[in-house]
């Protein structure tokens, strides 16, 4: 009995034989990082730092959750960072919020649909399709807002600042994001289809799900739309936090989102992953950034550390084919 329990624990720790992937080890790492920061820095445990940590991590959490939908079907969305910046630029235009708020989500859905069509109909590799869209959206953003500035609607500003019943609004943003994502992934047939499609792609049989009557192309396209919509939501949050538009605010956020998803155990080849794993991955990155800020590590070194971390996590993932 003891041997059987030990074997199950090792499989859980390694993420083998389970659709949720590796998440127990990153959780242990996150707990160790929090304990170490609490013991070595006096600022970490202060309420002001913890509140700032949550607010700083929230855009990444929202973006990473959306990115996970695409990764589950064996894709990547490199345009999400530009969508975040684009959203802040639109919201900072001299237009009423009743126009700009629905507008940013409509435009994000259009961007996601174009990405999805390029991947499913034109058979363009996801990296090439979304990288091209990244440049298109970034170019439009810098035409609209060459430098940071402008002002966002009061509703956007209010939705980020303050609290409700003593609960800081950024926490409510996170709860709402996770509830929507949980419903899509685990409370609907669509979520089952995503895992089935990704599992077939990861095993080298891209038509496996389609052979069982699952509309693969439609579901993949919808995954890219969802990713863009979550990126727009992250942009709304950031616009409310910086109270302006900024063409560079989403810079490299797509790589942070992919890193968080990978750390949380989602296989970049598709078919394996979990929502709670993605949350853990975001927590690890947030603690890493906060710790380096508290210890005065330069932003350039921080970027390099994240790059090495992404390479290490992806390198440790098992896959049956070269590439993602």
Image: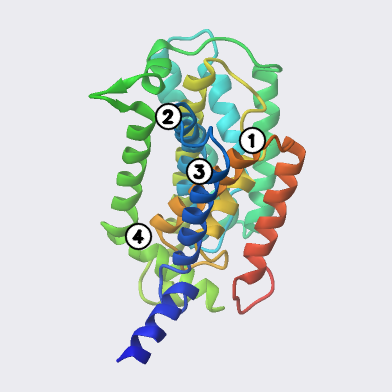
**Secondary structure category for the residue under label 1:** helix
- Report the coloring of the rendering: rainbow
The residue identified by callout 1 is: 293
Quickly name the residue at label 2: 47
- According to the picture, the residue beneath numbered tag 3 turns out to be 38
Between label 3 and label 4, give the one nearer the viewer.
3
Give residue 208's position: percent from left, percent from top. Answer: 45, 77
Residue at image x 58%, y 52%?
A: 258
Please tell me which residue lies in front, 279 or 180: 279
The numbered mark, 3 or 4, whose residue comes first in the sequence reads 3
Camera-side mark, 3 or 1: 3
Separation of marks 3 and 4 at Cα, in angstroms? 38 Å
Mark 2: few/some/many CA within 10 Å (<14, 14-19, 20+): few
Residue 170 horizontal/vertical position (percent): 39, 30
Instruction: From this view, report whether residue 201 is shown above or below residue 60.
Output: below
Between the residue at mark 3 and the residue at mark 1, the CA separation in whole angstroms equals 14 Å
C-alpha span from label 3 to label 2: 12 Å
Alpha-carbon distance for marks 4 and 2?
37 Å
Who comes first in sequence, dot 3 or dot 1?
A: 3
Identify which residue, 243 or 210, lies in the foreground: 243
Q: Could you say where residue 55 lies in the image, as x and y percent from the top left?
A: 47, 31
Q: Residues within 10 Å of mark 1 (few under 14, many from 20)?
A: few
User: Looking at the image, is mark 1 or mark 2 earlier in the sequence?
Assistant: 2
Q: On the image, numbered disc 4 is attached to which residue? A: 191
């Amino acid at each position: 009995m003891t041997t059987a329990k030990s074997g199950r624990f090792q499989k859980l720790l390694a993420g083998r034989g389970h659709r949720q992937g590796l998440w127990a080890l990153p959780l242990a790492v996150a707990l160790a990082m929090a304990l170490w920061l609490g013991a070595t820095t006096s600022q970490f445990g202060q309420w002001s730092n913890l509140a700032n940590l949550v607010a700083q991590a929230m855009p990444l959490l929202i973006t990473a959750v959306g990115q996970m939908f695409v990764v589950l079907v064996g894709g990547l969305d490199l345009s999400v960072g530009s969508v975040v910046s684009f959203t802040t630029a639109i919201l900072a235009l001299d237009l009423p919020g009743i126009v700009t708020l629905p507008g940013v989500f409509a435009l994000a859905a259009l961007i996601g649909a174009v990405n999805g069509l390029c991947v499913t109909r034109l058979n363009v590799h996801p990296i090439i399709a979304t990288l091209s869209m990244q440049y298109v959206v970034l170019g439009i953003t810098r035409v609209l807002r060459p430098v940071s500035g402008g002002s966002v609607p009061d509703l956007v500003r209010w939705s980020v600042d303050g609290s409700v019943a003593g609960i800081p609004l950024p926490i409510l943003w996170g709860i709402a994001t996770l509830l929507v994502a949980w419903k899509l992934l685990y409370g609907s047939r669509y979520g089952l289809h995503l895992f089935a499609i990704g599992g077939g792609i990861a095993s080298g049989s891209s038509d496996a799900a389609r052979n069982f009557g699952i509309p693969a192309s439609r579901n993949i396209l919808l995954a890219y739309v969802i990713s863009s919509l979550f990126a727009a939501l992250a942009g709304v949050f950031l616009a409310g936090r910086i109270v302006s538009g900024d063409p560079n605010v989403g810079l490299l956020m797509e790589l942070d989102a992919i890193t968080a998803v990978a750390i949380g155990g989602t296989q970049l080849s598709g078919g394996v992953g979990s929502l709670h794993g993605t949350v853990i991955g975001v927590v690890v990155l947030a603690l890493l950034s906060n710790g380096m800020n508290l210890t005065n590590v330069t932003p350039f070194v921080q970027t390099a550390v994240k790059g090495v971390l992404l390479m290490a996590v992806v390198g440790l993932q098992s896959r049956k084919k070269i590439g993602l």
